[in-house]
Amino acid sequence: MDELDTALLRMLQNDARRTNREMAAELGIAPSTCLERVRGLRERGVISGFHAEVDLAAIDRSTQAIISIKLRPQAMAVATTFQSYVQGLPETLAMFMVSGGSDFLAHVAVRDTQALRDFVLGLAKRQEIADIRSSVVFEHHRRTTVLPLPSR
């Protein structure tokens, strides 16, 4: 990753709909160079996709929560199956396998607190869950531009 790659990453993360020609002009490089650099970032797996950001409130999913889940038994097969199940639920935005007091943290978005209650109670019925706790998210801020860390 050099300065040009980093600049392209920043530009694409801020607006993935920018044209190759626009980015090349802003960076002062040939459009063919810009195209090759972006292609290289994709081929190396640095860029894994392009996505539209959705306003959750606009699609009636303004209530967010982080659900902390501890499983039993502590077996990888159980964890893998459970993780796949929760990731497949339409309410789930993100799933994290973590260390500490919980095995997983699930970030979910639902219509309202009643829908959150129903979701948590539905999960709690699963036999592999030893403990489940939810925390309502009052504010959510996410970094939209992620760049390589500087070398030390």
Image: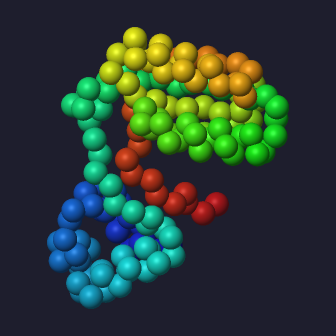
Residue 139 visible from this viewpoint: no
Percent across and percent down for residue 35 are: 30, 82
- Is residue 19 found left or right of 50 in the rendered image? left
Viewer-side residue, 142 vs 79: 79
- Is residue 20 found left or right of 107 in the rendered image? left
Numbered-mark total: 0
Percent across and percent down for residue 50 are: 34, 60
- Is residue 61 found left or right of 69 in the rendered image? left
Quadrant in which the C terminus appears: bottom right
Percent across and percent down for residue 17 are: 21, 62
54 is higher (above) or lower (below) than 115: below
149 is higher (above) or lower (below) than 93: below
Percent across and percent down for residue 75 are: 81, 40
Residue 61 sits in quarter: top left
Residue 77 sits in quarter: top right
25 is higher (above) or lower (below) than 106: below
Residue 148 visible from this viewpoint: yes
